[in-house]
Structure formats: C-alpha cells, structure tokens
Image (spheres, grey):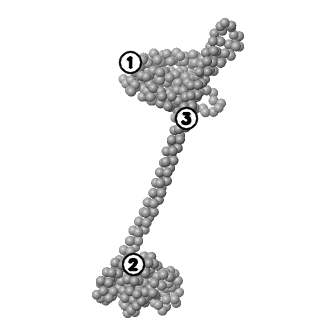
Amino acid sequence: MSEEQFSILLVDDDEVDRLTVKRALKKAGVTANLMEAKNGENAMAKLVNGIAKLEVRDTNLVAVSETNYFSSTINHPIKFDLILLDYLLPDFDGLHLIAKIKALNLDLPIIVLTGQGDEEIAVEMMKAGAADYLVKSKIEPDNLAKAISNAIRIHRAEQAVQLANQRLRATNELLMLKNQELERQQQQIKLQNIQLQESYNLKSEFLATMSHELRTPMNAIMGFSQLLLRQYPAPLSEQQQNLVQRIFNNSKNLLDMINEMLDFSKIEAGKLELKPQKFALNYLIELTVEELRSLAVQKQLELITDINLTDTYLIQDSNSLKRTLINLLSNAIKFTESGTVTVKAEEIDENKIAISVTDTGIGIAPEDRDKIFQAFRQADQTFTRQHAGTGLGLAITQSLVKMMGGTISLESELGKGATFTVEIPRKYDV
Ligand code: ADP
C-alpha cells in the first residue's frame, strides 16, 4: 500500500460490519480518513455538503462516527477518494444510491459490499457504475486494501485519460479556430494581391500611355531646335545658338527618360518580344562604344575595349544586347569623374559569353547592391543628388539579360569603381 492517506466514505447500517472493515483497514496498514454513514440519506448529505469536521483518533486510522461528527476541531472540506457501499441500506438500496451519486456528477470509485450469494446483484451494481465488489464475509485486510488501492488507481488513471482527452479536444478546437483564422487571412491576402495586381496593371498602362503621348511633342521640339541650329535662312546670335542647343540637349535627355519608361512598361506588361538574329559581337560593341564616346570625351575619360573572342558570332537579340551595353556604359561614364571605362568580352565556354563594363568611378556600397536593380531605385535617393536619371536603367537591363537567358552580376568597392558583368548564352534558346 502507498503512504498516501485516502478519504473513504463507509456506508453501512450494520455497526459490526463497519467495525470489521475498520479493523481490516487497520490491520492492512491503510492510512485513511474514514467517515461513516449509517444510511443512504446520511451518505448523500455528507457527499453533498462535502465539508466535514474530522477528528483524528488514530495516527494510523482516522475515523469519524455519527456521534462525534460535529464535535471535532479540524475543519476542512473532504474530497472523498472512494466509497465503500453496503448494498442493503435501510432507506434505499445500493443501485438507487449509485444513481443518486451519478446524478450529483460526483465522479468517485465505489466498492460494493455484498452478502454471501449476492454476486448477481454485485454485477448489476458494477453495470450501474461501481468499480468493484467484495463479499462481506470474505473481507480480509489484504483483499480489502488491494481492492481499495486498485479502484482508486484505476479511477485516477481514467480521470487522467479523460483530462488528457479534454485537453486534446481543447487543443483541437484551438487549432481549428487558428486554421479558420489563417484561411480568412489567406483569403484576405489573395484579395489584396488581386487589388495590387490591378493597380500594378493600371500603373503600367498609365506609364505606357503617358510615355507614348510625350514622345511626339518631344520629337517635335527636338526637330525644330535642330532646324534652328542649322541657321538657315537667317543666322542666330551666339546667345540664341546657345539657348537653342540647351533646348535640344534637355529635350534629348527627356526623350531618353521617356523611352526608358516606355521600355520598362513594355517589359512589365510582357509585350517586349526578342528577335534573335546572327550578328558579330565585336562589331556591336565597337559601334556602341563609338556612339557613347563623345560623353566620355566630355569628361576626359578613357574609353577602352578589350575583346577576346575566337568566335565573334552570336545568335541573340542584338537590340536587347545593345540596349544593355548602352545602359551599363552610360552609367559607367555618368558615375566616373576620372580614369577609364573598359568594355571587355570573352568566352566562358563555347556556349557562353561574358561581357563586362568596368569603371574607376564612385563605386557602389554593399547595402545598395540589390536595391539598384529595382525599378526607380538609386543608390543616392536624395533630392540633391548629383546625377540625373529615372532609376530604371538597371531594372530594364536585368530584365533584358534574363530574357536573353543570361545573368548580371556586380563587383564593386565604394570609391574604387564598379564592374557589371553580363553572361549570356551564345545562342538564344527559344
Ligand atoms: P539611373 O542611372 O537612371 O539612376 P539605373 O537603374 O541605371 O538608374 O541605376 C540605378 C543606380 O545604380 C544609380 O542611380 C546609381 O546609384 C547606381 N549605379 C549604376 N551604375 C553605377 C556605376 N557604374 N557606378 C556607381 N553607381 C552606379
């Protein structure tokens, strides 16, 4: 038997029988708070009140009898661990009492004490909810102690399982609730995504339309200022020439920006189609470099090409590659105040070409490296920045390189220049 002290309610009208039980308990060394009831009514009262005053009579066995029930000194609620129940009580029978106890929602193990030959009744009682039965005449310290400890142990195990099940149910319910909440959030995100996509499309359409509409008047401004610069039939004063030249230059800058926006919106809308054709890369590079040489000369920068190809031919979209080169070269020139800008081309293997643009300019800080490939993003986002631009060049370049089946990478150290390297397949794979 364990050291734990159980609280037991012994319900029996026969004093001798009660004494037998008490003796058996004592002999078996069961440490118990024992409360006695002589009939069903009395047992119910004790169970309902749940508060009893206990008198310690014995260090081993604590018993409370009807007579001294209210005369004790210790006052605390009794939570019974077990009921020992005589089947035949003067007021109502055991079955009746079990039903009443169940109706009270009192979850307690009950051991029924029956007379000789009452086994059938005992089975009925167990069906009604009793945990075990003992034939009174056969009560021995050992079997009584064992029956009590088994009934309490099994009952506690059942309660633990019940509690675990309850907790599991509660956790399940919580999980279901969380799932529902997650589903709701997912729906909301889906909806927001649709809305975002819609506004994104609207923005792209707006960009495309605006850029397109702005191009026509801009071309007219440039055309007329070029006409004026020809100074025919009447010559212009030096100041007039200067002003018209500035009109032309600024219009050209604006037109470049507008074209960039148009290209970007086309790429975003998936409306840009590549037209692969065979061309000589060295020729394309030399041509592009010459187109931009004047910009480098203006800043007294050295513009170098270093082409090292055994086979110069590519089957790619030459317009996209030229656009890529122009973007990288004009950035290199724009962000370099002195030194050189070098365009290098070489074969990585027979199917892959690397083209790099290296400058000795301001360089790019590590934290800006991802940012600058995003549309409308620049390393210097302040209003007072020195270099003009839309922040679309690298976003367009990256998209074009990706469409050509290639990749773009950047190596740079702040203040020591930058190298943008484009790797593309020699042959465009449809
Ligand atoms: P934009 O040149 O119109 O600002 P880009 O997309 O071409 O837009 O470039 C984004 C930013 O990346 C630039 O504003 C600049 O801060 C940085 N950048 C690009 N190329 C270079 C370079 N060669 N050296 C230093 N910074 C560069």
Does the Cβ of the disc 2 residue fall within 8 Å of ligand 1?
Answer: no
Q: Work out how far the residue at label 3 is from the one at label 1, CA to CA, in angstroms.
A: 45 Å
Residue contact between numbered discs 2 and 1, judged by CB atoms under 8 Å: no
Left or right: where does residue 98 sit relative to residue 218? left
Disc with the residue nearer the chain's start (2 vs 1): 2
Residue ID at (41%, 24%): 353
The residue tagged 2 is: 109
| Residue 118 sits above or below residue 283 on the image | below
**SS at circle 2:** loop
Q: Amino acid at mark 1?
A: Asp
Q: Secondary structure at mark 3?
A: helix
The kind of residue on which mark 2 rests is: Pro
Image location of residue 131, percent across then percent down: 36, 78
Asked whether residue 74 is in view, the answer is: yes
Residue topped by disc 3: 202
- For the residues carrying marks 2 and 1, which lies nearer the camera in this image? 2
Percent position of residue 180, x then y: 47, 54
Give the residue at the far top of this rendering.
233
Closer to the observer: label 3 or label 1?
3
Q: Which residue is mark 1?
A: 311
